[in-house]
Amino acid sequence: MSGPLEDVVKRWTAKRKSALVIEIIQGKTTVAEASRSFDLSPSEIEGWVDDARRGMENALRANPLDVRQEYEKQLRDLQEAYGEAMLELRARKKLAALMEREDDN
């Protein structure tokens, strides 16, 4: 990999993360290559790419949300997903218990 990220990066500032994400988006490097080069986990780098994508989408909205609104929206989305997952888990446990009762009869 060539460019501003060649040097060993000790501290991943927002500016450095942005530079790496741009290189990935432009196809100059891949998540796997960056992971090996900088001793970072692929999931961490993918998280930065996802954050950048969300930030770009928000910035390009007709009425962008401010940082607090965006954070609150993401928090609501996560809480909703968590609630749905918990309901599904309870339903599966209930179904398993009913099936066990039927098997016992």
Image: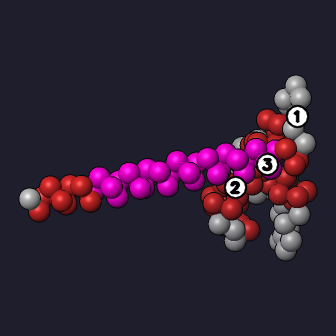
Secondary structure beneath dot 2 equals helix
Residue 81 locus on image (x, y percent)? 58, 48
Quadrant of the image occupied by residue 32:
bottom right
**What residue sits right under mark 1 in the picture?**
64
Circle 1 Cα neighbour tier, 10 Å, few/some/many (<14 / 14–19 / ≥20): some
Query: Could you tell me which residue is drawn at 65 percent across and 66 percent down?
Result: 41
Q: Nearer the viewer, mark 2 or mark 3?
A: 3
- Which kind of residue does numbered mark 2 sit on? Gly
For the residues marked 1 and 2, what is the alpha-carbon distance in whole angstroms? 21 Å
Image quarter (top left, top right, bottom left or bottom right) of the N terminus: bottom right
Classify mark 3: helix, strand or loop.
Answer: helix
The range drawn in magenta is: 70-96
Give the mark, 1 or 3, whose residue is nearer the N terminus. 1
What type is the residue that disc 1 sits on? Pro
The image's mark for residue 92 is none
Q: Residues within 10 Å of mark 2 (few under 14, many from 20)?
A: few
Question: Residue beneath label 3, please?
Answer: 72
Question: Which badge, 1 or 2, comes first in the chain's sequence?
Answer: 2
Question: Label 2: which residue?
Answer: 47
Residue 11 placement (x, y as % from top left): 86, 71
Instruction: Give the overall secondary structure of the magenta segment.
Output: helix
On the question of residue 64 being in view, the answer is yes
| Amino acid carrying mark 3 in the image | Glu
Q: Answer whether residue 85 is magenta in the image.
A: yes
**Residue nearest the observer in this picture, 6 or 102:** 102
Circle 1 sits in a helix, a strand or a loop, which is it? loop
Q: Are marks 1 and 2 in contact (CB under 8 Å)?
A: no
Q: Residues within 10 Å of mark 3 (few under 14, many from 20)?
A: few
Of the pair 24 and 60, the residue shown nearer to us: 60
Q: Splitting the image into 4 quarters, where does residue 101 fall? A: bottom left
What is the CA distance from the residue labelled 2 to the residue labelled 3? 18 Å
* Label 1 to label 3: alpha-carbon separation: 14 Å
